[in-house]
Amino acid sequence: YNASHNDYTIADLQLVQWILSQFATIDEVIAALPSVHVVSLDPSMQTIHWRIAEPGGRQIVLEIIDGKYHIHENEIGVLTNSPDFTWHLTNLNNYVNLYPGTAKSQKWNGVEISSISAGSAFHGIPGDVTSTSRFVRAAFYVATAPQRPTAFDTVLQCFHILNNFDVPIGVEHTLNNAPKDMPSATQWTVVSDVDNRCIYYRTAYNSNIRCIDLRTIDFARVRMGVFPLDSVKQQPIEMIRIVSE
């Protein structure tokens, strides 16, 4: 932070609002970035990334490293936390052996070796909750996901993929020392339908999928507001009643 830059300084948590409220395309964002100075509210944070997307499918990753903007075309369509985006892309080369389906049988010195389970062709995919492993896992699932006929079908498929990235309470802390407010657990999961301007989400308290249709909001009249993700922090349960004849 530099007080002499006040007129064009933006906090990192304000950057998304600044982008969404003023620009329609990625190129417009890239052109405008040099006009602002972004500062971190928490200097201890590691590399911060932003994924910026257009309805046509183009995505970029914006990173600020040593005070300089780094912009990458995100053709892989995946983003997680530190380290930097180029490191994650390089790391994918370590998993070139992965492919969907079941591994083919082989013969070793005349002995046939065959798969004992379906899906063995991606055996060895990292399953831990670190950002580096999540990047590999997400890239594989996205690259192998079938194309769905409608946007809504795609949204549901995205939630199925994102189920693989829920971080349960406690795993990132020593035993019996997990904070009560879940700072390191998955608190919410969001899927955005950019074409239809719909935001779908579920939370750790309620796994039912909810939708905010931005087309129903008159942004010229509605002021900024803050609303809880969960009105009640309780998972609703549908009771199935079985009646015998």
Image (spheres, rainbow, N blue to C red):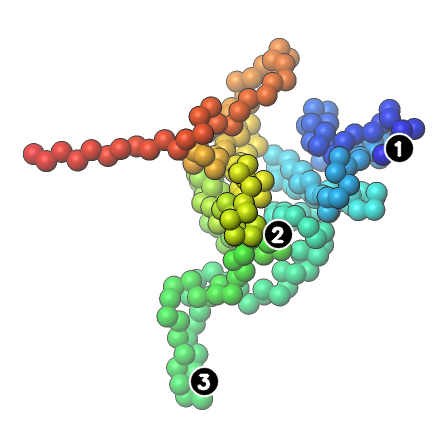
User: Residues under labels 1 and 3: Cα distance?
Assistant: 66 Å
Residue located at (70% from left, 43% from top): 49
Quadrant holding the N terminus: top right
Q: Is residue 175 visible?
A: yes
**Looking at this view, is 155 or 81 the one in front?**
81
Residue type at numbered disc 2: Ser
Q: Residue furthest right?
A: 4
The reply to whether discs 2 and 3 touch (Cβ–Cβ < 8 Å) is no
Q: Is residue 163 left or right of residue 34?
A: left
Residue at the (77%, 37%) spot, across then down: 40
Name the residue tied to disc 2. 131
The amino acid sitting under disc 3 is Trp
Distance in Å between CA atoms under marks 1 and 2: 31 Å
Q: Nearer the viewer, mark 1 or mark 3?
A: 1
Tell whether 110 sits left or right of 192.
Answer: left
Q: Secondary structure at mark 2?
A: helix
| Mark 2–mark 3 distance (CA, rounded to whole Å) | 36 Å
Counting residues from the start of the chain, the first of labels 2 and 3 encountered is 3
Q: Secondary structure at mark 3?
A: strand
Task: Tell me residue 22's x, y (percent).
Answer: 73, 24
The residue where tag 3 is placed is: 108
Residue holding disc 1: 2
Left-right relation of 54 to 180:
right
The image quadrant where one finds the C terminus is top left
Give amino acid for label 1: Asn
N-terminal-most mark, 1 or 2: 1
Quick check: 101 above or below 53? below
Q: Relative to 232, is 51 on the left or the right? A: right
